[in-house]
């Protein structure tokens, strides 16, 4: 009991070392936690169909070098500028200066990140202090990014479509030409008398019929390929949206908020953590103060230090006044 | 510590009624002569101790002179003497007994005080060990006990009476130390200076103003507690008072 009391008295004497870290620090931490403006983070996951991809960048995007290239493209000023202008979040009116747009673009670049989850999927994240803006901006940004990535694919597809369209036209003209020749040959055949002449013309007619069918088949094939490619490339040409299918780059997970406001349990945990840290700091400071205390208190310490006898010890006698030449002490005036 | 109360209704008591003061007096002023009370640094309580010793000495019947040579803190002179005077030590003849400078303390039959001098020349005069010795001898011839209050050893005021010189000139010296506050190396330095000067160090007087024992602190707490929760406070006060392990 006496040891506990002695310990309590010691701790009371060192109350500054204990109260500041264990009481004041958690209070300040709690106040900070309550006033802290939350940052909302949204992420979206995009999958790459490597069978359809022809660009080497998208074929091996998960390597560190290529992900760095993707990040540079994601944070490219023109892409970000388009995102800033697309999302009506930033500006309430159209009268915005170039400086403002530039400033928003720079700010946007610092809040965007991309990383490869595996060899077929990558993730884009965006952080904002406004919950409403976070998903909207990430949507606009990721759509613009997909458009940007698919630009080479779009170009290639357009070239293919043009080739196929040219083929369709060519075979169509060829068919017409062969049909015209066939009609001529059939007319000649109907007017020819001699057997030998008829046989020759008949052979020619058969050949021309074959050519017409061949041209027609090739035209149909080209037409079919063209229509198929046209359907597949529709999302490439019109741009990627979360509700449309895009065979090359697809949303595995649309933009969604993953972190946001702190709940009361978060505040409690933060306060508890700061209390534990404060307690540790308190113990450490008590230990250090004990180590650095070079004063002397007990008779033994004093006698060992100086080798002098102790004449006596004067306790705290309280407030002292003079009265009739005598010192008067008031011990009740001693502070706790 | 036994507390003697003059009246039950008033908490004040005579400072010299503390047993510790009586014991200190018996230990250091048993024999006649001069004693210099000094300290390592300021605010260690040397003036309080000086007065307590002088008052106790006077109360025990010894004709006592309290000399205030603490130029950094002339509280004693200010309290007890309405006017301070110039000592003019350099102009006085060798056999002058300085009796014109003594002030009798009202209320205490055997206690006199020599207030701090107004003239810096007298301070400078006492910086010589031989002159200081003569000064003390003159006083010792007229008084049973001469208690000298000086400034701290680390005080660096050129208008101050050097406590080391005074200590080596007096019969004995007591060094006041504030326990739990004054650093060990500072006290070591003060003791070394006194020893090197040849002062006779009677011993240390420990001032526990900032070093209350756990028992004292708990007793103070129980006194406060008694005002709030009288029953529990009284019980705890009794427990603490009679606990033998808390000191």
Image (tube, grey):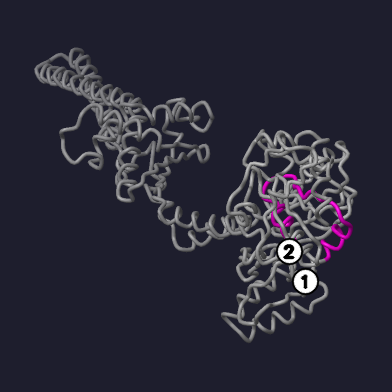
Magenta residue check for A319: no
Image quadrant assignment for residue B206: bottom right
Q: Look at the picture and state if A83 lies above or below B247.
A: above
Q: Look at the picture and state if B68 lies above or below A77.
A: below
Viewer-proximal residue, B14 or A218?
Answer: B14
Q: Name the residue under label 2.
A: A315
Q: Give the range drawn in magenta.
A: B23-52
Magenta residue check for B35: yes
User: Which of the numbered marks, if any, corresponds to residue A308?
Assistant: none
Q: Name the residue under label 1.
A: B1
Mark 1 to mark 2 CA distance (whole Å)? 9 Å
Does residue A291 appear in the picture of this structure? no
Q: Please tell me how many numbered marks the rendered image carries.
A: 2
Q: Say whether marks 1 and 2 touch (CB < 8 Å).
A: yes
Chain under label 2? A
Viewer-proximal residue, A292 or A32?
Answer: A292
Viewer-proximal residue, A186 or B102?
Answer: B102
Residue A141 point in image, percent of width and height: 33, 37
Image quadrant assignment for residue B166: top right
């Amino acid at each position: 009991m006496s040891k506990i009391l002695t310990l309590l008295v010691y701790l009371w004497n060192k109350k500054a070392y204990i109260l500041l870290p264990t009481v004041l620090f958690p209070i300040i931490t709690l106040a900070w936690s309550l006033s802290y403006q939350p940052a909302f983070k949204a992420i979206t996951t995009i999958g790459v169909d490597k069978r359809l991809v022809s660009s080497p960048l998208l074929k091996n995007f998960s390597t560190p070098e290529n992900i760095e290239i993707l990040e540079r493209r994601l944070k490219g000023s023109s892409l970000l500028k388009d995102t800033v202008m697309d999302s009506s979040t930033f500006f309430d009116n159209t009268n915005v200066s170039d400086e403002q747009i530039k400033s928003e673009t720079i700010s946007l670049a610092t809040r965007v990140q991309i990383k490869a989850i595996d060899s077929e999927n990558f993730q884009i994240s965006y952080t904002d202090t406004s919950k409403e803006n976070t998903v909207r901006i990430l949507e606009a940004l990721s759509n613009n990014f997909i458009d940007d990535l698919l630009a080479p694919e779009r170009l290639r597809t357009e070239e293919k479509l043009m080739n196929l369209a040219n083929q369709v036209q060519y075979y169509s003209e060829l068919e017409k030409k062969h049909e015209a020749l066939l009609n001529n040959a059939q007319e000649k055949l109907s007017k020819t008398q001699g057997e030998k002449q008829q046989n020759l013309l008949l052979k020619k007619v058969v050949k021309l019929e074959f050519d017409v069918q061949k041209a027609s088949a090739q035209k149909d094939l080209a037409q079919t390929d063209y229509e198929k490619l046209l359907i597949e490339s529709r999302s490439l040409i019109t741009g990627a949206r979360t509700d449309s299918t895009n065979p090359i780059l697809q949303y595995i997970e649309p933009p969604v908020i993953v972190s946001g406001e702190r709940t009361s349990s978060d505040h409690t945990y933060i306060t508890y953590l700061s209390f534990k840290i404060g307690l540790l700091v308190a113990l450490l400071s008590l230990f250090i103060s004990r180590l650095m205390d070079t004063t002397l208190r007990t008779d033994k310490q004093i006698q060992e230090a100086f080798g002098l006898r102790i004449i006596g010890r004067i306790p705290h006698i309280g407030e002292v006044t003079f009265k009739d030449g005598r010192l008067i002490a008031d011990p009740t005036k001693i502070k706790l | 510590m036994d507390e003697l109360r003059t009246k039950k209704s008033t908490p004040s008591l005579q400072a010299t009624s503390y047993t510790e003061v009586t014991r200190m007096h018996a230990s250091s002023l048993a024999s006649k002569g001069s004693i210099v009370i000094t300290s390592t640094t300021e605010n260690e309580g040397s003036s309080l101790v000086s007065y307590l010793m002088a008052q106790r000495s006077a109360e025990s019947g010894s004709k006592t002179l309290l000399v205030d040579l603490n130029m950094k803190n002339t509280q004693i002179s200010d309290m007890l003497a309405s006017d301070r005077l110039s000592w003019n030590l350099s102009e006085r003849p060798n056999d002058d007994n300085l009796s014109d400078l003594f002030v009798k303390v009202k209320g205490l039959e055997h206690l006199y005080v020599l207030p701090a001098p107004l003239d810096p020349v007298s301070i400078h005069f006492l910086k010589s060990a031989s002159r200081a010795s003569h000064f003390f001898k003159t006083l010792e011839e007229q008084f049973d006990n001469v208690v000298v209050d000086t400034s701290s050893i680390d005080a660096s005021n050129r208008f101050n009476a050097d406590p080391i010189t005074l200590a080596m000139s007096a019969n004995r010296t007591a060094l006041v130390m504030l326990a739990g506050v004054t650093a060990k190396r500072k006290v070591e330095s003060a003791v070394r200076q006194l020893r090197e000067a040849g002062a006779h160090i009677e011993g240390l007087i420990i001032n526990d103003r900032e070093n209350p024992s756990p028992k004292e602190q708990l007793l103070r707490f129980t006194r406060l507690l008694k005002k709030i929760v009288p029953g529990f406070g009284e019980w705890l006060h009794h427990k603490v008072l009679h606990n033998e392990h808390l000191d």
